[in-house]
Amino acid sequence: MDKSQLGVISLKNFDLNSLNNFTCGDKSLDRFIRDEATSFEKNLFSSTWIVIHENYGVIGYFSLCNSSLELQEQERMVLDLDASKNKLRAPSILLTKLAVSKKLHGKNLGSTIIKIVTEMAAKYSALMSARLLIVDAVNDKAGFYEKCNFEYCVNNKKDNKTAKMYLDLLHI
Ligand SMILES: CC(C)(COP(=O)(O)OP(=O)(O)OC[C@H]1O[C@@H](n2cnc3c(N)ncnc32)[C@H](O)[C@@H]1OP(=O)(O)O)[C@@H](O)C(=O)NCCC(=O)NCCS
């Protein structure tokens, strides 16, 4: 998928009626964009971005908020930080939601959106430091994030349904 065919628009400037029949195949993510995202946006709990393709219209969305991640010794070493320093938290951007139109799954749109998110996160990081992009990946989607170069956190099991994963923004 060519990134130049995609545009990203803030939910603040988007008319939700233009979502038409958008579904990503996950009811909770469909409900979030229709019924909850606007309130999250107004209350500064997360910012949501709609992804539009020049031919297909709305092809997906993602939501971001601030977060942090307590680094384990192995992660401190991988990130070239002081490995002996316990309780070191890395400022992070949390990808709270990611959804691609169900009819377009498997066409590299998800991975292209991750590239867009990564570039946005790296720009934000220049202003307000954030070392990592993190995600709580639903277990059967963790393979997708692996393909997008996310690493598993050492303490990755938040519960038995999700895996915490991170992407280093330092050299983006
Ligand atoms: C998960 C989702 C965003 C992936 O988007 P997509 O456009 O279908 O994925 P892509 O085509 O960009 O896939 C990129 C790579 O990841 C792989 N991949 C995609 N989904 C995968 C999965 N569930 N498990 C393992 N690998 C996966 C693809 O095979 C592809 O590999 P390749 O580069 O070797 O060909 C999309 O399926 C979706 O919106 N699902 C419903 C909502 C959801 O579950 N969101 C994530 C919650 S954590």
Image (cartoon, rainbow, N blue to C red):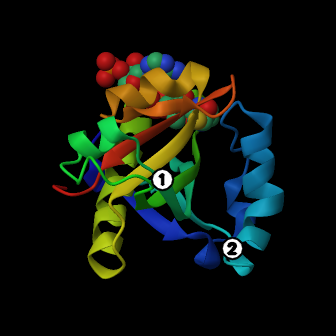
- Residue sitting nearer the eye, 36 or 18: 36
Q: Position of residue 83 (x, y in %)?
A: 26, 47
In the rendered image, the quadrant that contains the C terminus is bottom left
Say which mark, if any, is on residue 41: 2
Amino acid type shown at disc 1: Leu
**Count of numbered tags:** 2
Residue drawn where x is 44% and y is 21% of the image = 143
Rendering quarter of residue 89: bottom left
Whether residue 122 sits left or right of residue 30 in the image: it is left
Q: Nearer the viewer, residue 70 or 92?
A: 70
Which three-letter amino acid code belongs to the residue tagged 2?
A: Glu
Ligand 1 within 8 angstroms of badge 1 C-beta: no
The numbered mark at residue 16 is: none
Mark 1 lies on residue = 69
Sort mark 2 into few (<14), some (14-19) or many (20+) by Cα contacts within 10 Å: some
Q: Position of residue 130 (x, y in %)?
A: 36, 66
Residue 104 coordinates in the image, percent (x, y)? 51, 31
